[in-house]
Image (cartoon, helix red, strand yellow):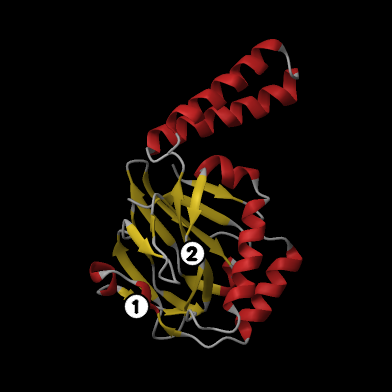
Amino acid sequence: MLLQIPQVLNAEELAQVKSLLGDADWVDGRVTAGLQAATVKNNQQLPEQSAQMAMLRKIVLTALNRNPLFFSAALPLKILPPFFNRYAGDTNTYGFHVDNAMRMMPDGSGYVRADVSATLFLSEPDEYDGGELVIDDTFGTHGLKLPAGSMVVYPSSSVHQVTPVTRGQRVACFMFIQSMVRDAVKRRLLYDMDMSLVDLRANVGEIAPVVQLTGTYHNLLRRWTE
C-alpha cells in the first residue's frame, strides 16, 4: 500500500526542523546504505553524532505519535529512529534500490525489520527541480514530490529511487517501521476496514452494526499482530 499523509508536521514544527537542519553538517549518504544500495546512492546525510539529531528525531516522532492515519496504515511496533538526507549539487540522486530487510538500531541495541518505509518531505516542491521519489511495485509506478511536512508510506519491499535534483536542494526525513502486522495484505485489509469505520461513524453514528464491525476489526488485529 502506498499512502500519502498530508501535514504530518505543523508549520511551527516544520520551521523548527528547517532551522535545525540549516545549521547542520552533512556527510556521505552511503553511511547507512546496504551493499547494493551503496552502488547507486549519491546524496548527503545527517551524521548520527550530529548535535541536532536528538531534537530532530523528537519532533518527528512526536508528530507521528499523534497522527491516526500513520498509525492505521503502518501499525508500528518499532520505528527505526528517523534519518535526514539532502540532495543537491554533485550529490543529487539515489538510483533504483530495495531497502534492506533488517536495519540495525543506531545505538547497536538490536534490529528493526523494515516492513514499511516512509519519506517525510522537508523542502517545498518549487524549491528544487527533479528529486521525485519514484516507487515501483505491484500497484504500479508512482512519482511523488509532496509539500513540505507531508509524508508518503510504502512497502519496504518496493523498488524505488530519487531522481536527480538539477536545481536547488531536496531535504527529507526517512525512516523504517516494523509493523505489528507483518503481512502487507493483512495490513491493507485492516487499514481499509478502519477507514470505512471512520466514515460509517461520521455518517450513521455508533449504531449496533458499526459497534459489531469495530469489534471485528479489533479481533482481527488481535489475531494478526505479533
Give left or right: position of 98 versus 44: left
In the rendered image, residue 63, in percent from the top left (x then y), is placed at: 66, 57
Residue 43 picture quarter: bottom left
The quadrant in which residue 108 appears is: bottom left
Task: From the image, tell me which residue sits under label 1.
Answer: 30
Residue at 45% x, 27% y: name it: 223
Viewport quadrant of the N terminus: top left
Res 148 visible:
no
Q: Residues within 10 Å of mark 1 (few under 14, many from 20)?
A: some
Report the front residue among 158 and 76.
76
Please indicate whether residue 180 sits to the left or right of residue 114 in the image. right
**x and y percent of residue 10 in the render?**
72, 60
**Kind of residue at badge 1:** Arg
Label 2, label 1: how many angstroms apart (C-alpha)? 14 Å
Q: Residue at x 52, y 43 (%)?
A: 75
Q: Position of residue 49 (x, y in %)?
A: 50, 83
Q: Amino acid at mark 2?
A: Phe
**In the foreground, 172 or 143:** 172
**Residue in the image at 55% along x and 49% along y:** 4
Q: Secondary structure at mark 1?
A: helix
Q: Secondary structure at mark 2?
A: strand
Q: Is residue 30 visible?
A: yes
Q: Residue furthest top?
A: 208
**Residue 148 in picture, x, y percent from top left:** 62, 64
Residue beneath disc 2 = 174
Q: Relative to 89, does residue 144 appear above or below in the rendering? A: above
Q: Are marks 2 and 1 in contact (CB under 8 Å)?
A: no
